[in-house]
Amino acid sequence: MIISQTRNYDNFMQDNKALQQTSNANQIANQKHNLTSNKTEAVKEVLGYGVDSEGFFTSDLNEAAGIPKDYKIYAKDIENFVNYHQNRSDILATHNQVDIAKSLANAYKAFSQLIPQSQSPSFSNKELENMPYAFKMDSNYNVTQTYTYAEYQSALNKDESGILLTFNTFDSRGFSKINAETIFNQADNVSINKYAYQNANGIAKGGVLIAFLNNSSLFFNVNQFLEGETKILGKIIGLDKNISEKELENFKGFMNANKIQSAFGENNDSWNTIEEQLSLQYYIKRSEATGDKDLFKESLSFAQEYQEMIDSSMSLEEFKEKYLDFKERHEEFVKKLKEKENILSQSEKQNSNEETELGSKNKKFKPIQVTSKSETYQDTSFLNTLDFIKSQQKLEQILILFGERSKGNFDIQNFKNFLTSSWKRLDTEV
């Protein structure tokens, strides 16, 4: 009897030891699953960093960005994010080359000041809901102020500037509360694969960080965490750390005083690359309407040259030099175009007078139809520009980008009306 009980006890202890070993093994496996794979386990590379068999970056990206290993990042999301911000066809693209490690490092510095302190590899829905709804930060990514949902709504009503949403919680229906679904809202920014981060405990830390990186302002195209090779637009809105505020101020003053003639006959005080792109496209329409092939070709050439200038990564000083040369040549083109339009206008008046003198009172007036034998100009980037301008949210972005709203002396509605009327003239005036 005693021997039987001893054996049962021994069996119990052995089974318990086996269960404990299994539990420890499962914990180790779970911990390993929640951590980035070692860079030696990479099966391919994306953006110069290793990617494991499940599609997540290996530890080399986390090491380069200074991010803890329990932040597993889905490689396809980052690839899409980088491609989006390097997209030449987007009128608000700010970079030609994004340094993703430095950009992630910047985002994590601010993000780590907003998140709850937790050893868990995931954030629960409750933890997400308790995060600040919005925040302000300085140029070194130090968070200087946080806002609850109600405080953010109040700040918006006061037109307070410099506030960044923590997540992309804004959509066509308005502002939503933070939760496991809304942090992955897609408006104008990149679609994040939320299913790569969802688990029984909530959202994996890596997914929450990427949702944060993917949205650094209400106006999503301008991402203040980005680092890399900036386009001219990136430089003039302050995303290039190598350019001081004084340099930017001097550059903008120079450009305001030297902007090219607008095709709409209205030159605002402030230089604006978006208005100039629209103006150059309207010059194409006007020159095509004259039937003069040489003028039409010139207009196409100027639009292309301008696009190449603002898409470049040249210095501001080099841009000013090239812009002045561009302006001088463009003014000669505008002079020739106006002369041609005047000749056509005089011819139209003369024909009208002759018809009146001949007594053609009952004849319906027909304006001169100028036919161009050249192929109608179709520019994908211009079509994108038109779509851009027709979007009210994008119009607001223009104002933010060029600092007009914060000055307090700019009439938003008048600016919208100007762009809307410019759009209509493109379709009807010619």
Image: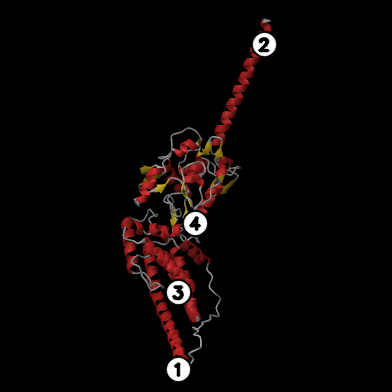
Is the residue under label 4 in contact with that under label 3 (CB below 8 Å)? no
Question: Could you say which is closer to the camera, residue 420 or residue 242?
Answer: 420
Residue indicated by mark 1: 357
> Circle 1 sits in a helix, a strand or a loop, which is it?
helix
Residue indicated by mark 4: 86
Q: CA distance from mark 3 to mark 2?
A: 97 Å
Q: Earlier in the sequence, mark 3 or mark 1?
A: 3
Viewer-nearest of labels 3 and 4? 3
Q: Earlier in the sequence, mark 1 or mark 2?
A: 2
> Circle 4 sits in a helix, a strand or a loop, which is it?
loop
Is the residue under label 4 in contact with that under label 2 (CB below 8 Å)? no
Q: CA distance from mark 2 to mark 4?
A: 71 Å
Viewer-nearest of labels 1 and 4? 1
Q: CA distance from mark 3 to mark 1?
A: 35 Å
Counting from the top left corner in percent of width and height, residue 42 is at: 58, 43
Is the residue under label 2 in contact with that under label 3 (CB below 8 Å)? no
Which residue corresponds to the image point at 42% horizontal and 66% vertical from the top-left? 419
Residue type at tag 3: Tyr
Counting from the top left corner in percent of width and height, residue 395 is at: 43, 60
